[in-house]
């Protein structure tokens, strides 16, 4: 007799925990339902698979050409973008290097003040001078000017005709 | 009355009957598979239920077990008996289920079979064994047995279920589990010792 005889006898009582009598037939009915739903699911999946394979069979040749082409285009695009970025980075780093080598005070660009008083005075003087010359010529020679008397005033250093035959403006005094 | 000498003969005829049903099922006869389901559902139910201690889990798991068997029956080559094959599937799937359930949820130990206390045979056995099973409420007894079973690991619970509750022999269990008979005996001894510590006040 085993030393665990009593325990085994006790555990054996669990064999009476059996399902109800109608369990098997109910179980079988449910099993059939499961099988049917699984078959339907499988058939729909197989139908989907068939359609997909048909679709890809038709398109397999063009796709095989398109795919490498797309890869090449993508590669070129990435390569180009990387080059542009690397160029930008060189410029940026160059400017940074130059600005870093300069003292902070010098790195500040001097603002070109076009409205400064001195420049304005020079410009005004030049305009007044030109106007004065023109007016004096106008009033001195009331008759038709000779071609060789055409005056040339140079402001910027290059010869620019500033006066020619001046005609009275029609209806000026009206 | 069935004697020990009749057992091999009955097992052989059962095995031959199974082989015919399996061949028919392999040829696409769904009624043959239905007969196999009818035959093995009560046995497998007992095995799965005593390992899970939950009726809903047992019913769901049995559906999966027979669905898997149905899908695989065409690949069944008859190297072992159908009985060993279906039991192997059931044990493996139940152990996998227990591993998953152990990860995500705690087992309800209160899940007991309320109908058993009305089972005349059960009442007869417990009344006859009153010297062993002391005065204890049947419902309480079931709870205690289930709780004690749940203390065992999956492997130990399997051998106790197959040997003590379902009455399989050591060699049959070793075939089902794919382990040696020595391993089966060792697991049984260890499992009985654990059960004794939890149920010693009842024996």
Image (cartoon, rainbow, N blue to C red):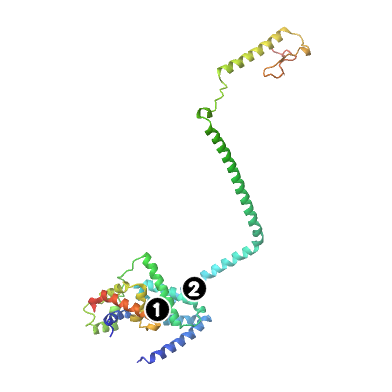
Q: Quadrant of the C terminus of chain A?
A: top right
- Identify the element where label 2 is drawn: helix
Q: In the structure shown, which secondary structural element does the residue marked by tag 1 occupy? A: helix
Reply above or below: A134 against B81: above
Tell me the residue that label 1 is attached to.
Answer: B44
Given residues A58 and B194, the one toward you in this image is B194
Task: Locate residue A132 relative to residue B115 in the image: left or right.
Answer: right
Q: Residue at x 72, y 7 (%)?
A: A140
User: Which chain is home to disc 1?
Assistant: B
Chain letter belonging to callout 2: A
- Extreme-right residue of the structure: A147
- Name the disc covering residue A36, or none: 2
Q: Position of residue B116 (x, y in %)?
A: 30, 78
Q: In this view of the protein, can residue B190 be seen by the observer?
A: yes
| x and y percentages locating residue B169 in the rendered image | 37, 84
Front tag of 2 and 1: 1
Can I make out residue B54 in this image?
no
Q: Residue at x 24, y 76 (%)?
A: B200
Does residue A129 appear left or right of residue B40 in this picture? right
């Amino acid at each position: 007799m085993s030393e665990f005889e009593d325990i085994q006898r006790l555990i054996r009582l669990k064999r009476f925990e059996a399902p109800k009598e109608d369990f098997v037939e109910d179980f079988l009915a449910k099993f059939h339902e499961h099988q049917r739903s699984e078959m339907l699911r499988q058939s729909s999946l197989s139908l989907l698979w068939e359609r997909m394979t048909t679709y890809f069979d038709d398109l397999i040749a063009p796709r095989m050409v398109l795919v490498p082409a797309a890869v090449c285009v993508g590669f070129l695009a990435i390569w180009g973008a990387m080059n542009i970025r690397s160029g930008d980075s060189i410029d940026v780093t160059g400017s940074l290097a130059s600005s870093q080598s300069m003292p902070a005070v010098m790195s500040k660009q001097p603002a070109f003040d076009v409205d400064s008083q001195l420049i304005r005075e020079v410009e005004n003087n030049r305009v007044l001078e030109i106007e004065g010359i023109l007016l004096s010529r106008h009033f001195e020679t009331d008759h038709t000017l000779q071609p060789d008397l055409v005056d040339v005033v140079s402001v910027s250093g290059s010869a620019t005709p500033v006066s020619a035959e001046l005609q009275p403006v029609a209806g000026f005094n009206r | 009355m069935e004697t020990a000498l009749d057992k091999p003969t009955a097992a052989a005829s059962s095995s031959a009957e199974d082989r015919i049903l399996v061949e028919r099922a392999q040829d696409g006869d769904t009624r043959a598979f239905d007969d196999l389901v009818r035959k093995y559902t009560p046995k497998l139910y007992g095995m799965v239920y005593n390992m899970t201690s939950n009726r809903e889990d047992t019913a769901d798991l049995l559906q999966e077990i027979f669905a898997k068997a149905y899908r695989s029956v065409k690949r069944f080559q008859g190297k072992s008996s159908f009985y060993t094959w279906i039991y192997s599937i059931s044990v493996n799937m139940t152990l996998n289920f227990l591993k998953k359930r152990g990860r995500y949820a705690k087992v309800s130990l209160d899940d007991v079979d309320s109908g058993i206390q009305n089972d005349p045979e059960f009442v007869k056995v417990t009344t006859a064994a009153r010297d062993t099973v002391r005065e204890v409420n049947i419902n309480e007894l079931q709870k205690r047995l289930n709780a004690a079973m749940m203390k065992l690991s999956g492997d130990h619970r399997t051998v106790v279920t197959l040997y003590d509750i379902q009455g399989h022999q050591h060699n049959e269990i070793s075939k089902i589990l794919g382990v040696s008979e020595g391993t089966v005996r060792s697991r049984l001894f260890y499992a009985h010792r654990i059960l004794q510590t939890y149920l010693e006040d009842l024996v």
